[in-house]
Image (spheres, rainbow, N blue to C red):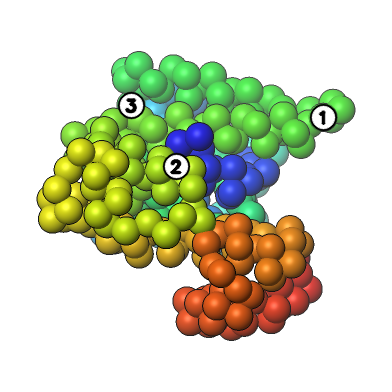
């Protein structure tokens, strides 16, 4: 299994909380801050998206936007429009059949936007944010957007249904949505530093696959460089530049991600977890975990379990 699949499985995306908006005339809406990555899909009309730095992007029907850290996402009817709804006002605005409506129905053609919050397993939810650039935009004219548009349509239909197996179907659709979006990003010429950056390079992708296939192995930079046919110095530099961390640092971070997941979900004793991820004893694992996470494994498991 490849690194991206491993991470998506560990994240366990399970729920999309959908919202729909229709707007007419001159309008501006600031989306309330969200606790996790959020996607927006323009199903009709056109609008402008303004990011946290004030940069404007035009979105037209069929365009898709994935926002990794939604804190100040703004949608506008045109670049000069002001924000007329924000935060509590947005939540309290008039809703018809679950669709928030802005402006008057007879004031020109409607712009319609579907939005959703991607909720991941709490142990490692930050991994998804680290995977992504701040924003990913897919235009309707791009080949991949058709596949994503179909997925969004299915997610919307499934979320409104009450059929048996609804939650499982939603979870699977969200996994595919994430993978389709992220692997498209990994194929770009200048991908976001992180796992996507590593996957964009064939030899670095092989190194990541080696780490994920045998996380308990005592990997060294030399071992990995030899496996992918590169010199130690070149491999270390290219890995750090593309992935954003040194090879051994990435290995340690992935071990801790697996450990947090196992502790949160009660998968094994400390000794079993330690051996599974490459530590020779529970005490060695506990020391490493405390240094990197900030608390002992037992405290992490108890505290997270109580909140979960």
Q: Residues within 10 Å of mark 2 (few under 14, many from 20)?
A: many
Residue bearing the label numbered 3: 139
Which image quarter: residue 34?
bottom right
Q: Is residue 261 left or right of residue 136?
A: right
Mark 1 neighbour class, 10 Å CA radius: few under 14, some 14 to 19, many 20 or more: few
Residue 184 seen anywhere in this rendered image of the structure: yes
Query: Residue 59, percent across and down?
Result: 34, 33
Q: Is residue 145 left or right of residue 161?
A: left
Please, is residue 171 above or below residue 192 in the view? above
First-in-chain label (3 vs 2) = 2
In this rendering, is residue 164 above or below 192?
above
Residue that numbered label 1 is attached to: 165
**Which label number is shown at residue 148?**
none
| Residue 147 or residue 217, whichever sits in front | 217
Q: Which residue is mark 2?
A: 3
Rendering coords of residue 51 (x, y %): 32, 53
Residue 281 occupies which quadrant of the picture? bottom right
Question: Of circles 3 and 1, which is in front?
Answer: 1
Q: CA distance from mark 2 to mark 1?
A: 28 Å
* First along the sequence among labels 3 and 1: 3
At horizontal 67% and vertical 43% (from top left) the residue drawn is: 14
Could you tell me residue 116's position as x and y percent? 57, 42
């Amino acid at each position: 299994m490849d690194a991206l699949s491993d991470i998506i499985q560990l994240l366990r995306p399970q729920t999309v909380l959908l919202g729909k908006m229709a707007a007419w005339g001159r309008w501006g809406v600031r989306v309330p801050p969200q606790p996790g990555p959020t996607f927006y899909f323009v199903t009709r009309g056109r609008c402008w998206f303004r990011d946290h730095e004030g940069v404007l992007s035009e979105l037209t029907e069929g365009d898709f936007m994935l926002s990794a850290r939604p804190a100040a996402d703004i949608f506008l009817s045109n670049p000069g429009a002001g924000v007329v709804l924000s935060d509590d006002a947005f939540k309290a605005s008039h809703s018809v059949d679950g669709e928030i409506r802005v402006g008057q129905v007879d004031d020109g053609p409607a712009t319609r936007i579907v939005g959703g919050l991607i909720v991941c397993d709490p142990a490692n939810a930050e991994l998804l944010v680290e995977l992504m650039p701040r924003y990913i935009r897919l235009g309707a004219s791009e080949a991949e957007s058709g596949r994503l548009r179909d997925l969004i349509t299915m997610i919307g239909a499934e979320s409104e249904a009450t059929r048996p197996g609804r939650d499982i179907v939603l979870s699977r659709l969200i996994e595919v949505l994430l993978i389709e979006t992220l692997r498209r990003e990994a194929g770009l010429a200048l991908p976001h530093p992180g796992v996507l950056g590593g996957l964009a390079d064939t030899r670095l992708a092989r190194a990541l696959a080696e780490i994920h296939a045998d996380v308990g192995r005592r990997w060294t930079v030399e071992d990995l460089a030899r496996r992918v046919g590169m010199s130690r110095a070149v491999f270390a530099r290219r890995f750090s530049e593309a992935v954003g961390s040194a090879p051994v640092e990435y290995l340690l971070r992935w071990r801790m991600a697996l450990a947090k997941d196992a502790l949160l979900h009660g998968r094994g004793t400390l000794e079993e977890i330690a051996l599974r991820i490459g530590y020779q004893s529970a005490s060695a694992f506990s020391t490493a975990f405390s240094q990197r996470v900030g608390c002992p494994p037992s405290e992490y498991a108890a505290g997270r379990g109580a909140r979960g």
